[in-house]
Amino acid sequence: MKKPKKHKSKKLVGQIPGSAIYTGEKSTLKLFIESFDYNKQQCKEKELRDVEESFGFKFSDTVTWLNINGLNHVAEIEKLGKHYELHPLVIEDIVNISQRPKIDEYENYLFVVLKMLYYDTDEKIVSEQVSFVLGNNYVLSFQESEGDVFDAVRDRIRQGKGRVRDMESDYLLYVLIDAIVDHYYSVIDTLSDKIENFETAIFSGHVDDDISQNIQNLKREILRVRKAIFPLREVINRIEKNDNKLIQPSTLTFYRDVYDHLIQVSENIDIYREMIWSLMDMYMTTISNKMNEVMKVLTIMASIFIPLTFIAGIYGMNFEYIPELQYRYSYFILWGVMVVLFISMLFYFKRKKWL
Amino acid sequence: MKKPKKHKSKKLVGQIPGSAIYTGEKSTLKLFIESFDYNKQQCKEKELRDVEESFGFKFSDTVTWLNINGLNHVAEIEKLGKHYELHPLVIEDIVNISQRPKIDEYENYLFVVLKMLYYDTDEKIVSEQVSFVLGNNYVLSFQESEGDVFDAVRDRIRQGKGRVRDMESDYLLYVLIDAIVDHYYSVIDTLSDKIENFETAIFSGHVDDDISQNIQNLKREILRVRKAIFPLREVINRIEKNDNKLIQPSTLTFYRDVYDHLIQVSENIDIYREMIWSLMDMYMTTISNKMNEVMKVLTIMASIFIPLTFIAGIYGMNFEYIPELQYRYSYFILWGVMVVLFISMLFYFKRKKWL
Amino acid sequence: MKKPKKHKSKKLVGQIPGSAIYTGEKSTLKLFIESFDYNKQQCKEKELRDVEESFGFKFSDTVTWLNINGLNHVAEIEKLGKHYELHPLVIEDIVNISQRPKIDEYENYLFVVLKMLYYDTDEKIVSEQVSFVLGNNYVLSFQESEGDVFDAVRDRIRQGKGRVRDMESDYLLYVLIDAIVDHYYSVIDTLSDKIENFETAIFSGHVDDDISQNIQNLKREILRVRKAIFPLREVINRIEKNDNKLIQPSTLTFYRDVYDHLIQVSENIDIYREMIWSLMDMYMTTISNKMNEVMKVLTIMASIFIPLTFIAGIYGMNFEYIPELQYRYSYFILWGVMVVLFISMLFYFKRKKWL
Amino acid sequence: MKKPKKHKSKKLVGQIPGSAIYTGEKSTLKLFIESFDYNKQQCKEKELRDVEESFGFKFSDTVTWLNINGLNHVAEIEKLGKHYELHPLVIEDIVNISQRPKIDEYENYLFVVLKMLYYDTDEKIVSEQVSFVLGNNYVLSFQESEGDVFDAVRDRIRQGKGRVRDMESDYLLYVLIDAIVDHYYSVIDTLSDKIENFETAIFSGHVDDDISQNIQNLKREILRVRKAIFPLREVINRIEKNDNKLIQPSTLTFYRDVYDHLIQVSENIDIYREMIWSLMDMYMTTISNKMNEVMKVLTIMASIFIPLTFIAGIYGMNFEYIPELQYRYSYFILWGVMVVLFISMLFYFKRKKWL
Amino acid sequence: MKKPKKHKSKKLVGQIPGSAIYTGEKSTLKLFIESFDYNKQQCKEKELRDVEESFGFKFSDTVTWLNINGLNHVAEIEKLGKHYELHPLVIEDIVNISQRPKIDEYENYLFVVLKMLYYDTDEKIVSEQVSFVLGNNYVLSFQESEGDVFDAVRDRIRQGKGRVRDMESDYLLYVLIDAIVDHYYSVIDTLSDKIENFETAIFSGHVDDDISQNIQNLKREILRVRKAIFPLREVINRIEKNDNKLIQPSTLTFYRDVYDHLIQVSENIDIYREMIWSLMDMYMTTISNKMNEVMKVLTIMASIFIPLTFIAGIYGMNFEYIPELQYRYSYFILWGVMVVLFISMLFYFKRKKWL
């Protein structure tokens, strides 16, 4: 097995609390900021060269989506954080990519961390952290690197499809979270396919040594997906239930919808988890069945030929006086006896259903 | 195994929230709408040609049941939804057939999604989504296709049997839900029968390779039924506990009755689930027992004949001086010794309870 | 195994809600009503011929216990229900004998359903439904058939033993429920005995094929008992905690006592459940141990005699020139070698603790 | 196995509620009452001859501890109960020794039942019921028989060590409960030792048949300890949380301390429970490993000698023309071939790590 | 296995409640007290010779951290406790090193107990108890012995890095707890590594007898870590949720951050726990697979050579008239037959996938 890159919890021991340190591995990426600034009438899309360019959006009366890629640029992110008056712990959580999905409510903004899940080209699950800051008229999103599941959202903003251009920043946050949760479905579909493949393999008796290893890996995958998705339920539930002035009542229905999707995904994950534990049982049973089959062949061969060989051995003895040896037809009679024995043994095993 | 048609979660990734897209597979079905419009005195039953015909019922002071079949006709359903002032997310949930059972309360209506369960002709469990909209004087029901469990309800409305014609729309909704929950009983009875059949099969020693596969399939079936039924408890509980002006206090007793039935069904499902996990254990034990039996036959055959063959081998040696070979009765004495050995071995195994 | 009569959930699909239909199998039983009408001074016991005779008790100022046997007489029970102003759903629940233990509070009465458990003559657990209606000055009890656990209660009422004649109908209900719960103890004692018998059997190595079947049956029995008893805790808890005008504060202490007993019974059931799951493990271990023993005998026999037979085979070869064959003492030397081999093998296996 | 005396739940079926019936087995014990009557200045210790002697303490303004041993003397205890105005159900619970740990609050006193645990001389866990009644200025304690864990408490009262003489009866109750809970530690230490011994035994390969039986017994012991200790948490928690005028605020800190100890004991018990379930797994693995070892010996012996014996058999055939038989060195060449075969087989098994 | 020193729960039975008795084993250590006394402007660090030296800090208006090492010096700690007005139970808990993590709120101070976890040089997990007392302007910390995880904190105080010098004692307590929780990450990383090593070992087939023992040890380690960490969540949660005047609102955000870390650690531990249970399954499967392999070799050898040996035996018989023996080419024909048999057997096993 080629060992996958280990995904350590990179909380640096002894570090000053509230100090922002990037804990990921993509330390050579360029900072990349895109901005969408829109209202019902128009939408300006722009790729920003540096953080300072984004400062103006804070006070505009249009809705702004600032999407910041490249968490290794800690200093720039801190600058942005200072301008948008983010708490130092928020900055720390943004660049520390091993956060648990969570929501923190601050006076003027809402901070949400969650995990974007997708399969990479090696069929490994990738869990990338995405942080959102929801302000009065803006949403900041922070990603480790470019490439995400938001392309459909971008299109909708550009072309004014759906409701997004008519609504406030709280709806934009919903749309972004919804895009991520939608993607969970494709991840669990892949998991479901894998389980079905294993089932088919085990049912058809292809039980090589790798199966138990692959099942173990699949278990681990499900545990990781679970860890990424389950805490998010609590996050969305708190958005929906709490009375936060940043989220308007009319948007709550949409968050409830996301919540329903998350519950559905969670239930599926738990079903898959149960299925895979029971897969292991089936695998054990299949091994036992195979062993049984092997034992039967051995038992049949040995049980049939051991007595026959004994008889042959009897007449191979060199006693001076063995009366049977002199009869002319002894040999043929013996063959007859042996064939009868052989056949009746076969019959016996047939009746026992070992053949 | 003929692989059953996969039942993917068809949430379309990247779709605009609130956009109604039919996610099922029956895209060629005709739209079919039936209406029951009744009060204590009379009942008008009609098959409607198009959605517009149903618009009048909204303002009548009789109770109306509109049963819409054919979720692929999204445009028509949207038209209906607009007239009955349904939220876009409600329309989306109606045509997206992979919803989890849920209840959403809106200002003027109650939206309930649940799953109708039945066995199809191939003995596969079918889980069809049914959505209800309860308004002041109407119930809208949406089904994927014709054919349902409501025939007894239709009869009761037509013939004025029971209480249904005397009551409001909240009672009608209860009657429809009750019909679906009643049908769950027949589903879990079938499950119970299947488990008993497996038990009988395993007890009587018929342990072919298919058993573990069938048990796995049964597990999956139970998990699916569980997933369809369990969330409904919460739905009914919320109807019963909450204070919704659409449900009259006198009807609450009936919803509590449905709730009791659901709890009972749920408990049975969990019992079946535990039974089936323990079935797998029994199956393993039976396999081990069979292997034991095979091993015993082998051990007895080998243990009896191996020493005898050794003795025969001794007197087949060609040493020039083996004194026993010259005695006249050696051969017969040897037979005697062998028979004694044979019998005492049998005795030994008898005492060990291997025979 | 003689298959026990199947105990289906007999909710009739498609039936009108609130319509009373007897779901049991004892449809030929006679209706049998006994009445106890008492106060501190006196007690009148009477066997009633028909339902109408009981109507007077509703307005008497003495306490009345009406015990109705024979749920197949649905019409009579409906008549009684009408007189005592019972809700149609209550009547339905009384005659539908597959109810879950529950309590429903109505304006003027309390409706309690529970399960009477006992072992029948075939050592099968019987779970008979008993329903109680507690009114202001009466208790109605409904049983499927005659024969119950209330004889001690009858004696106490007749002879004025204990507190029952001094108290109101709420205390009478308590006494009846207490009698049923007391009987649960004898049921779980029987379960405990069965488990101990299995343990003793497995410990002493009597592992025939029936054991796993019997353990499976015992599991099912425990699950059934659990299903009958566990919901009752919630029922009694609601009586004790809620503020119902029919139950006087001074009687609450007694209900709390019943509740404590139920908790104790429940805990024992869960302990037995855990024990029996672990019994299956022990059984598997015992089978493995037995197989081990069989394997050892085979290994010892084969390991000792296979090399010896090989040696004998060597000197049975017909080569013209085998020097050992000519020596006079070859045969005896060979025997010596074989005996030494035999003994050292035995030693080896002894040291390995296989003998 | 010498079967331990069965410990049935001795609730007598059909008994009048509130009637005191001793359910234990020690029916020949003498009644033994000791009294400690103390305040800050002095302490009078006395052994009472009969119940009446204790009546005066009820109205004294000193703190009194009355320790009553001998629950078989029901009549005396009822007399005492009447004087101290105890509810009949309290008396019933005191003499019914199969109570679950619980607390009942009455107007003028608090009734606490718990279980004293210790190992008897046969290394069996004994669970003896102790009941406490906490009044304004007295604590009554009821034990089945003499001999308890309170000796250190007696010393402290006599010699005025610690705080006990300075405090009220609520503190005395705490001290007594604390003594019992302290003793739980030594019980779970013994459990821990037993588990470690089994582990060591299994690790070192001593897997006789008794192990699975002993593990089963240990499981049962842990379940019993659990049953005795777990409900006590709720009892102490209710003392600590509720607002009972008999417990002074300054004493609550001490009850919280006992509660912490109980939580710790409970957590340890659950850890031991998990360890012991996993012991069974380890035992199964060890058995499988042993079987593997046996199989390997058999396989090696058979695999090596079966082909060699075949070769010897070939040259034991009596065909008239077998060219090899005539060559002078055939025999020696054959030996060479066999030795080579033998060695290469050993090599093969060595490489397979079977040797 | 060298048995690790047993870690008994050393609550001394019969001891007076509130009496401070050191329950650890390091009874010869010197008392070592260090003090940090600082405000925004300055920081005085000092090693104190005796307890009395620390008394002044209680009334200073700077923030003081008193770190006391050496819990065996009970008398000194009691002196300190008296001066700082600590409750006797607090002193008892400080020196009793088998406390469960907990928080107790007193009038003027907060008492927190938790566990510092690290791996010692023998790769054993060490769980050392650390107690904190948070007063208005001081934090007392009590450790069993010198050596801890606070060096980074010391540096930050000395050099004024981070926020610590600007804040009150409540922030200092946070910083110290955070340092301990940070260290949990390295502990669970080690656990994760161990599990991966076992997985790799089992996957690659290195299944010696020690594996099951090592897995059992690892299980025990995880249970111990769990026991040390899980109760701490409740502790921190109570700090964060409760309204304690010692903790300022601005510091709460930081405690929430620690809480998030703890939840993350806890989730990881539960994942590892599930992984390790499934490791045992995999190990069982691997053993079964190995046994299968051994069985196959045996079956192949026996199945091929047993019939061949039988044939050889036939022609070793000494019947006077066996026609085949006279033919000149019999021997060669027989070899041919045998080779064909041999090859077709190999083919058969090949097709069965046993080779």
Image: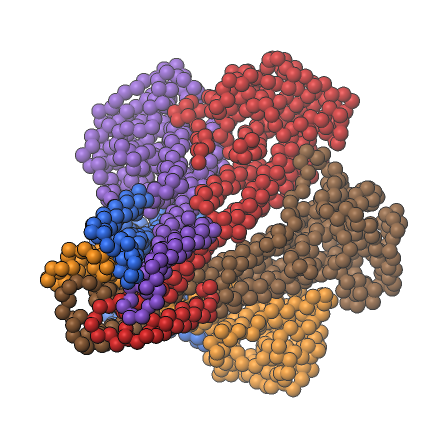
Chain colours: A orange, B blue, C purple, D red, E brown
- Residue occupying the point 36% across, 23% down: C153
Decide if residue A15 is on the left or right side of residue D269: right
- Residue occupying the point 71% across, 44% down: E23
Vertical placement of A99 versus C111: above or below? below
Query: Residue C246 or E277: which is nearer the viewer?
Result: E277
Decide if residue D149 is on the left or right side of residue C158: right
Residue A328, given in percent of the width and then of the height, sits at 10, 62
Does residue E88 show up?
yes
Residue E319, given in percent of the width and then of the height, sits at 17, 62
Residue C304, given in percent of the width and then of the height, sits at 37, 56
Query: Residue D86 or B110: which is nearer the viewer?
Result: D86
Decide if residue E88 is on the left or right side of residue C187: right
For the C terminus of chain A, the quadrant is bottom left
Splitting the image into 4 quarters, where does residue A81 fall? bottom right
Splitting the image into 4 quarters, where does residue E260 fall? bottom right
Vertical placement of D49 versus D324: above or below? above
Does residue D259 show up?
no
- Residue occupying the point 65% across, 33% down: D179
Decide if residue E172 is on the left or right side of residue B62: right
What is the tally of numbered marks visible in this picture? 0
- Residue occupying the point 33% across, 30% down: C140
Query: Residue C142 or E348: which is nearer the viewer?
Result: E348
Residue D125, given in percent of the width and then of the height, sits at 53, 35
Farthest left residue in view: A328
Vertical placement of A21 versus D40: above or below? below
